[in-house]
Amino acid sequence: MAVRKHIRDLTVRSGEYIGERFVLLKCTDENAPLPPMLPGQFAQLRVDGSKTTFLRRPVSINYVDTSDNEVWFLIQIVGDGSRALARLKSGDSLNALLPLGHGFTMPRGQSDSYLLVGGGVGVAPLLFLGDRIREMGGSPSFLLGARTSEMLLEKDMFRSLGNVYITTEDGTEGERGFVTHHSVWRERRFDMISVCGPSPMMKAVARKACDMDMPCEVSLENMMACGMGACLCCVEKTVRGNVCVCTEGPVFDVKELNW
């Protein structure tokens, strides 16, 4: 069933820097309740105030607080567009097209155990996912990876939802190495592996999950322009042919992908 899309002028409640490269925007609609959103869906954010940015920017839905009518976006600062978004402050307006795409598979039973694996800013959709899994009676655990401890994001929020396992490439926090090296893989089995992050990381986790006969879904981060399947920028090869990630995904069962 198609999900109704909304264009909303959101009001920024706060913009919080996390280190030097990331900003957490907390936004609300002052005129109406936010539309229903699912973990793994995303928004296309209009960028105002940048002379070099003409297209909206796709950003994962980091968290939805229905009690406060808030939606959060975790922004990585990489270019003019994201720098303009990072300059937004309390009271500013942010035009958003949302929710877009299809999200993660949710628990079917109260005993379902999930391992949510994220790298870098790829952890963004996993916070909302973990919150909803726990709300539905499932059990989320998180495996977060980064090059160094300073690049680990929202650790305290994840710890409020479940067990958190960490790897850093330089060994400054958690176990040294990549997420696929963590000892949790030898100690536990999970009913579902959910992954978002750099493509090499997702492919490595997908191979590991398949080798261990555990279901695995990944949230692809292909380049997007329109977010609605018109521009064909985000096409991905799958077992059923080429599909647009923005409309058929961004979440896919790894068995659908030609990896």
Image (spheres, rainbow, N blue to C red):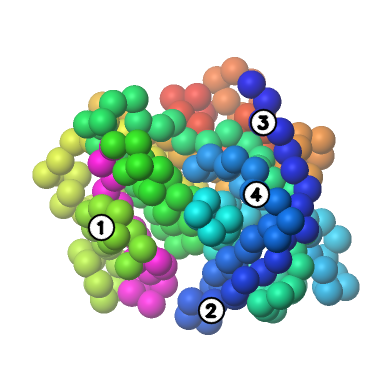
Distance from the alpha carbon under mark 1 to that under mark 2: 22 Å
Q: Can residue 178 be seen in this view?
A: no
The residue nearer to you, when weighing 211 against 70, is 70
Q: Position of residue 33 (x, y in %)?
A: 65, 49
Going 30% across and 54% down the picture, which residue do you hit?
Answer: 161
Q: 185 or 75: nearer the eye?
A: 75
Circle 1 residues within 10 Å: few <14, some 14–19, many ≥20: some
Amino acid type at circle 1 is: Val
Q: Earlier in the sequence, mark 4 or mark 1?
A: 4
Q: Give the range drawn in magenta.
A: 138-155
- Label 3, secondary structure: give it: loop
The residue under label 1 is 164
Q: Which of marks 3 and 2 is in front?
A: 3
Tell me which residue sits at (29%, 73%) in the image.
170
Q: Which amino acid does label 3 sit on?
A: Val
Image quadrant where residue 69 sits: bottom right
Q: Is mark 4 on a helix, strand or loop?
A: loop
Looking at numbered disc 2 in the image, what kind of residue is underneath it? Answer: Tyr
Q: Which numbered circle lies on residue 3?
A: 3
Would you call the spot at circle 3 few (<14 residues within 10 Å), some (14-19), or many (20 or more)? Answer: few
